[in-house]
Amino acid sequence: MYKWKISFLTITAVLGLLCSFPAFAQENDNSFVNAGPGVQAVQEPVESEPPAEPVPAEVSLGTFKITGYCGCERCSGEHKLTYSGTVPKAHHTISADLTRFPIGTQLRIGDTIYTVEDKGSSVKGNTLDIYYDSHDEALANGVYYAEVFLVQ
């Protein structure tokens, strides 16, 4: 049987080898850094962009007078298309002052988003005219005031 003689120098050499390999420690951000005897921790500055300002999806334009119109002779005359050339649709088409809201502008009134596709002779400033399928519906909704939002 062999007797192993382990000297102090052998133990020191083995421990020196074991301790000379770099160890890795995990930080909270899941990145690895060198750690161990003789290694100094160096944190590199992290460049981060300033938080972006939230862009509101809608902007309140204030309170507007809301009226209704339809495609009948009384409301639209002989015009069967909107000023923009589209066929008007209920829950979609709205008439606005084009100096304030160009064709294609989207406005929310209540829970419905309308698209400006038409203009009217009496639609000026803070007045909007919503298209309805029938004259009775336009009259039933009457004239009222509501907060209007610009949809971006």
Image (tube, rainbow, N blue to C red):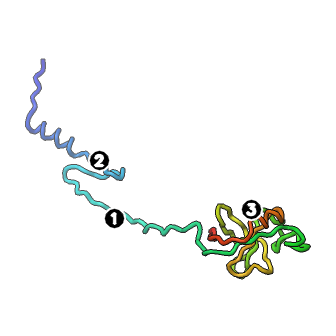
* Residue under numbered circle 1: 45
Which label's residue is closer to the chain start, 2 or 1?
2
Report whether 60 appears left or right of 105: left
- Hey, what amino acid is under mark 1? Pro
Q: Residue at x 16, y 40 (%)?
A: 15
Residue 54 or residue 134, whichever sits in front: 134
Image height check: is 84 above or below 20?
below
Residue 24 badge: 2
Real-space CA distance between mark 3 and mark 1, rounded to the nearest whole angstrom: 54 Å
The answer to whether residue 1 is above or below residue 39 is: above
Q: Distance between the residues labelled 2 and 3?
A: 63 Å
Residue 115 lies, in percent from the top left, at 72, 68
Residue at horizontal 36 percent and vertical 50 percent from the top: 30
Residue 29 on image: x %, y %: 35, 53
Amino acid carrying mark 3 in the image: His
Residue 82 is drawn in which quadrant? bottom right
Residue 105: image x %, image y %? 70, 71
Q: Which mark is residue 91?
A: 3
Q: In this view, does 23 lie to the left or right of 96?
A: left
Dot 1 crowding, Cα within 10 Å, few <14, some 14–19, many 20+: few
Q: Which of marks 2 and 1 is in front?
A: 1
Which residue: 36% across, 63% down? 46
In the image: residue 35, left or right of residue 149:
left
Tell me what residue is drawn at x 19 percent, y 53 percent. 38
Q: Which of 141 and 98 is in front in this view?
A: 141
In this view of the protein, can residue 116 be seen by the observer?
Answer: no
Of the 4 image quadrants, the one containing the N terminus is: top left
Quadrant containing the C terminus in the rendered view: bottom right
- Depth check, mark 3 against mark 1: the one in front is 3
Q: SS for tag 3? A: loop
Residue 45 drawn above or below residue 61: above
